[in-house]
Amino acid sequence: MTKENAVLIIYNPVAGRGRAKHLWPEVIRGLDAGGIAYTILETSGKGHALEIARAESARYSAVVAAGGDGTAHEVANGLLLASGEGPTKPFGIIPLGNGDDFVKMIPPETGIGSQPFPVAEAIEKIARRRVVPMDACRAVPVGSAYSQPRYFINGMNVGFSAMAGYNFSTLPHYFTGFMGYLAAVLKTLWNYPVLKVSLTVEDAEPLSLETTLAAFMNGRCFGRSFWVAPQADVRDGKMEIMVVRKIGRMGILRKLPKLLSGSHLDDPVISWFQAQKIRLTSSDSVMVEMDGEIPFDGIHDIELEVLPGILQVLT
């Protein structure tokens, strides 16, 4: 079989804090048993999956991220850069990470409180080659040192959740899965930012407020088990935007069970918006988390836009 008919597997061996390496023999057995022609390129560090996807995707029939949310994030960014924000090369995911949140949106969607499909089902999706167009989102910092846009496929966060994402990356590697994310949340309770922000939703008048957490969601879940936007749809051309007003530590702790069950939609301290375009500005220095990564820090102005149906996802 020619390379043009083969699948490129971009494998992150350190994903999932050991989970990827543990599952990798099962992945290889499944690919071989499924009769899938493939090439594996292994990543060597942060940013490498993006560069591989951008440079190599044109040579293959599909590109698959084998890793966690960060790997999927980088591969999607590489594909979108390679396509010039046109429809991407078919994109698949073998979930080997701690959170694996975007794959919860791939049909059949994962139910609230559950985890996504296993390796065997991921390989079935690759072999089947059925493609469903899904949205991705572009983020462009304004007036900063960051010169390139970044794309997110699951969600972007600022405030408490962004700090928690950063703190997760600093935990010892034996903190994995839900317990790792919970440990990061508890660590963040000691010191988290409350941001003064201005939100411009579509063409409406700017709204000024103080927020403990603001999430801009394409998908429904982040941090493995926090169902932030259970109403989100990756094919509706809109972001679901959750803004939590300024609350204290006890208020955050009281919100956690609701986020785990997705029952917080009518909470009085939470405001909801839906938009294709939104701009966030702040006099404060803002750390940005996207799909489990921290691509921007110290910014004050960022523009977000949904790119409808641009990501061609294997399902």
Image: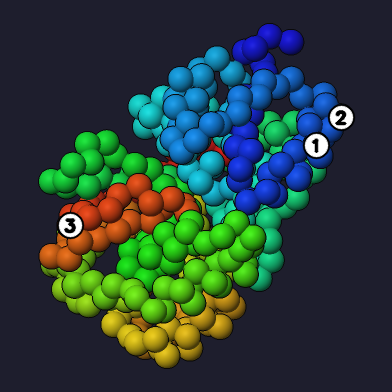
Q: Mark 3 falls on what kind of element?
A: strand
Q: Determine the residue located farthest toward the front in the rendered image.
A: 172
Q: Quadrant of residue 90?
A: top right
Query: Alpha-carbon distance for marks 3 and 2?
Result: 50 Å
> Is 16 rendered above or below residue 184?
above
Percent from the top left, x then y, of residue 191? Answer: 34, 76
Up-down relation of residue 223 to residue 19 (above or below): below
Q: Position of residue 194 (x, y in %)?
A: 26, 75
Q: Nearer the viewer, residue 192 or 153?
A: 192
Say left or right for 300 vs 228. left
Give the number of the mark in front: 3 or 2. Answer: 3
Residue at image coords 54%, 49%: 69
Residue picked out by circle 1:
25
The reply to whether dot 3 and dot 1 touch (C-beta < 8 Å) is no
| Residue drawn at the location 79% of the way across and 32% of the way down | 28
Residue 281 picture location, percent across and down: 17, 61
Going by the numbered disc 3, the residue's amino acid type is His
Q: Which mark is residue 33?
A: 2
- 104 horizontally vs 201: left or right: right
